[in-house]
Amino acid sequence: MRVSFAHNRPMKNEIIALAANVTDLAGTVPTEIQLTPDGLFRAKDGRPAELSGWLINAEIAQNVIQLADSQADAFVIDYEHQTLYAKQNGCPAPAAGWFKNLQYREGLGLFATQVEWTDSAALAIQNKEYRYISPVLSFEPKTGVITKIHMAALTNNPALDSMKDLCALAADYFSPPQDLQMPEIDKLKARIAELEKQLADSQAACTDLKTKKAACSDESVDLSQHVPVAAVHELQKELAALNSRINQNAVDDLVKVGLSDGRITPALTDWAKALPHEALSAFLDKATPIAALSGTQTGGNAPEGDGKSNEDSATQVASKATAYQSQQAALGFVIDDITAINHVMSEWVKNV
């Protein structure tokens, strides 16, 4: 079982170790212990001096119990409030017991129930080595209203001379670190305000979209301000045809250039014209000009005839290019189509 002390009390609360108003165990090992009397009460040594007393009733106890229920870990019972002295004296603070449940009883006060004791603590109580229970609690400094139970201790000194020092130690132990107090709260408030603004902006945007959607579905929309869908499709077709013509013209220009410097043979004219502009341009960038073809009698154009010889030549080039790729692949090299055709054409020129 673990124990932790909640550091979430308001800064206006004062913490005190209530060691002067204790429960007498009388040698029994109880499963419940009384933490406070009911109503208005004060310690045997007169505390709190500045108030008429500390106060607890059914309504106050309900708030204290709800706060205790929200804490995940159990409350510790130690020996002589050593948990509060540990920083000062460097000694360990072993637990004597634990409790989690609080219960208010009309006319009696606030009790811890289902208390679990360690074996050594139970034996010490039976042997009357420890006789009293002393709780540590928080209260409102102006009203004395009890706000929180922090822990309890086994003790034999129900009215310690060093009670003021013990109260100061308790206040220091249970107070939150300074940097986790108001500055941190201010940051959280600013973040909440920022998130609220973002939420408001999102809601406004949603409202605007809904308004626009409603306007679009309104039958009173002015159709003269909108283009028919059929007209848009027709324009898209015309644009596609125009782009095709532009691309073909560009291809024809590249073919002429390739024929003129020998990078395209007459046999490959139809093949070249069928390529997209980008593909043909890439081929010409890699192809090597063939001097023997740059001064042909036909000026780079296909010779007159039925075109059968051109088709045969193109087929032969393609066949040889494929064979060259297979040959290189067997050697572990990957050759693209353009490089293969360029190689075949170069070999062909060498043999002319």
Image (cartoon, rainbow, N blue to C red):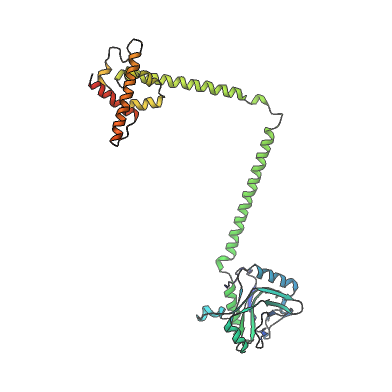
Q: Quadrant of residue 37?
A: bottom right
Q: Is residue 140 left or right of residue 285?
A: right
Is residue 215 visible to the viewer in this orientation of the structure? yes
At horizontal 66% and vertical 46% (from top left) the residue drawn is: 203
At horizontal 51% and vertical 22% (from top left) the residue drawn is: 239
Q: Is residue 281 left or right of residue 33?
A: left
| Position in image of residue 240 (x %, y %) | 50, 23
Q: Quadrant of residue 97?
A: bottom right
Check the picture and name the quadrant holding the N terminus: bottom right
| Position in image of residue 275 (x %, y %) | 40, 23
Tell me if residue 91 comes above or below residue 212 in the rendering: below
| Position in image of residue 233 (x %, y %) | 57, 24
Q: Quadrant of residue 82?
A: bottom right
* Observer-nearest of 272 and 227: 272
* Observer-nearest of 54 and 63: 63
Is residue 257 visible to the viewer in this orientation of the structure? no
Q: Is residue 270 left or right of residue 193?
A: left
Check the picture and name the quadrant holding the C terminus: top left
